[in-house]
């Protein structure tokens, strides 16, 4: 094993033919790199990084219109297999699920995000459910969040949330590409909104404590990815008869700040809560 200057370690190892074939098949099927699959397997075996939140940039920077891409999707995948974010120029909604990254686009389509796509804001973790529960008869977004409030372990730690099920109806929005420097409220004023019915899918996202509001979106922030990968976006409202909810607590935050001129020059001293509520809430 050798040590590189950037603290990335290079490992040479021998794999039996069965393991090697299984690894190659997994990579062909999912598009993951061998490095990613082996790193995730080692992290799981050693119980590492399961409660670490990796974040690129801050919500305050987004509010100020700083959404030029600064980190590649391939780099995000090194830090987690679950999460959400957006892409360069606020070009759509990002969903990271089971180690695969998806881009919900403003025209309503969904595609696999290229590994070299740039993200200006992202939140990721290695998801491993600490608690699983069933919710029945969900009538609205407000109803869902109220019920989640009752089962979250604390108001002072980050909680990753994965929700699976059939949605009688669900409303999502997708941010559209905007000119650099356009503040978030103005940029999302022309966002695309979609109302979908009878859809099987997964909600991916986080609950962020209020004290972290200058870093991340406070409260609940969830993105949809349909099971057929045809629909996705930032969740605004929903109705569902039965949902399976998995909660994963993160108590360690790793924050990667951009070194772009726009970020370094931005005034991030204000409280972005009101602007985030308006931009993220859409027409709920």
Image (spheres, rainbow, N blue to C red):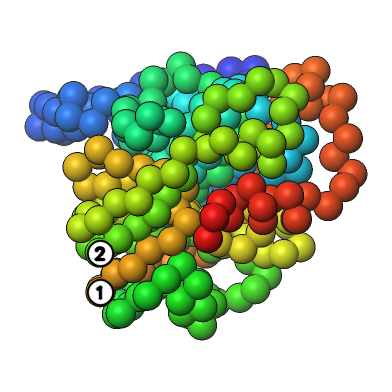
- Which residue is drawn at the image coordinates 20% and 58% (left, top)? 198
Task: Name the image quarter holding residue 65.
Answer: top right
Residue 168's spot in the image, x, y percent?
25, 64
Dot 1 falls on a residue whose secondary structure is strand
Relative to 210, is 204 above or below?
above
| Mark 2, other Cα within 10 Å: few <14 / some 14–19 / many ≥20 | some
Relative to 171, is 84 above or below?
above
- Which residue is drawn at the image coordinates 14% and 32% (left, top)? 22
Viewer-closest of 23 and 115: 115
Task: Name the image quarter holding residue 28.
Answer: top left
Q: Label 1, on which residue? A: 241
- Which residue is drawn at the image coordinates 33% and 46% (left, top)? 225
Viewer-closest of 1 and 92: 92
Q: Tell me, yes or no, if residue 81 can be seen here.
A: no
Task: Name the image quarter holding residue 127.
Answer: bottom left
Which-is-in-front pick, marks 2 and 1? 2
- Dot 2 or dot 1: first in sequence order is 2
Question: Residues at badges 2 and 1 in contact (C-beta under 8 Å)?
Answer: yes
Q: Label 2, on which residue? A: 168
Drawn side of residue 64 relative to residue 20, left or right: right
């Amino acid at each position: 094993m050798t040590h590189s200057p950037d603290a990335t370690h290079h490992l040479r190892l021998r794999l039996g033919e069965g393991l090697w074939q299984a690894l190659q098949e997994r990579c062909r099927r999912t598009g993951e790199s061998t490095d990613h699959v082996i790193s995730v397997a080692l992290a799981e075996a050693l119980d590492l990084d399961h409660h670490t939140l990796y974040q690129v940039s801050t919500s305050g920077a987004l509010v100020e219109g700083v959404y030029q891409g600064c980190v590649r999707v391939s780099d995000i995948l090194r830090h987690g297999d679950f999460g959400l974010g957006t892409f360069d120029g606020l070009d759509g909604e990002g969903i990271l699920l089971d180690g695969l990254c998806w881009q919900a686009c403003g025209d309503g389509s969904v595609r696999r995000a290229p590994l070299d796509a740039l993200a200006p804001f992202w939140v990721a973790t290695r998801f491993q459910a600490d608690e699983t529960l069933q919710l029945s008869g969900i009538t609205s977004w407000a109803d869902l969040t109220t019920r989640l409030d009752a089962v979250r372990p604390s108001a002072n730690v980050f909680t990753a949330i994965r929700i699976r099920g059939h949605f009688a109806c669900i409303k999502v929005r997708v941010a559209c590409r905007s000119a650099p420097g356009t503040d978030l409220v103005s940029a999302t004023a022309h966002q695309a909104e979609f109302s979908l019915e009878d859809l099987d899918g997964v909600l991916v996202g986080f609950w962020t404590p209020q004290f972290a509001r200058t870093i991340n979106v406070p409260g609940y922030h969830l993105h949809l990815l349909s099971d057929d990968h045809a629909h996705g976006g930032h969740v605004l409202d929903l109705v569902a008869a039965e949902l399976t909810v998995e909660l994963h607590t993160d108590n360690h935050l790793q924050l990667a700040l951009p070194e772009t001129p726009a970020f370094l020059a931005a005034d991030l001293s204000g409280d972005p809560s009101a602007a985030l509520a308006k931009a993220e809430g859409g027409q709920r």
